[in-house]
Image (cartoon, grey):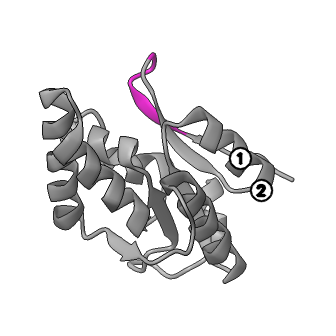
Amino acid sequence: MEADRLGGSKGVARIVVVVDSSFLIQLAEGVIAPSMVLEALEASFRFMAPRQVIEELERLANEHPKPKVRRAARRALWMMGRLGVAVEEVDAGNADDAIESLARRLKGEGLSVVVATNDRELRRRLRSLGIPSLYYRESAGRLELEWEIL
């Protein structure tokens, strides 16, 4: 198993999963179950998000013209509390830049990092940095881990 080589001891989170707003919304809507993350990574993990992701969800919850999107964003904010998502202050402009910055910092600290996002452009950026991403493949109905071995 690829994840077994990531180190750490049993019962201790071995991977930090940095989440974006679209992934959190899919968790809140039940499209993605937390157990699917465990199954995809085959290792213990903990969720983390930069403050900008929370701000993005708050904007969607309060200002989006579609009620369905507002409800989904509110559920995602609620789900963050239920899942114990740690929020980090990151000095970056938008949510994608903050996610990339946080992932780079954590990787630089020697942690195993995966970014959970359905944003193709962000996944491309992460791939160029050697940071794996976890995304929902709708056609297969499952999470997939995208690695780029450099």
**Image x and y of residue 111, in percent:** 61, 77
Check disc 1 and report its element: helix, strand or loop: helix
98 lies left or right of 37: right
Circle 2 crowding by C-alpha within 10 Å: few under 14, some 14–19, many from 20? some
Magenta segment includes 140: yes
**Image x and y of residue 132, in percent:** 65, 52
89 lies left or right of 35: right
How many badges with numbers are in the image?
A: 2
Residue tagged 2: 129
Q: For this rendering, which residue is in front, 96 or 117?
A: 96
Q: Residue at x 59, y 57 (%)?
A: 97
Q: Residue furthest right?
A: 150
Q: Are marks 2 and 1 in contact (CB under 8 Å)?
A: yes
57 lies left or right of 29: right
**Image x and y of residue 92, in percent:** 57, 67
Residue tagged 1: 125
Q: Residue at x 77, y 56 (%)?
A: 129
Check disc 2 and report its element: helix, strand or loop: helix
**Image height check: is 52 above or below 65?**
below
Range drawn in magenta: 139-144
34 lies left or right of 46: left
The N terminus sits in image quarter: bottom right
Q: Residue at x 61, y 43 (%)?
A: 122
**Image x and y of residue 87, in percent:** 36, 73
Magenta segment includes 22: no
**Image height check: is 12 above or below 144?**
below
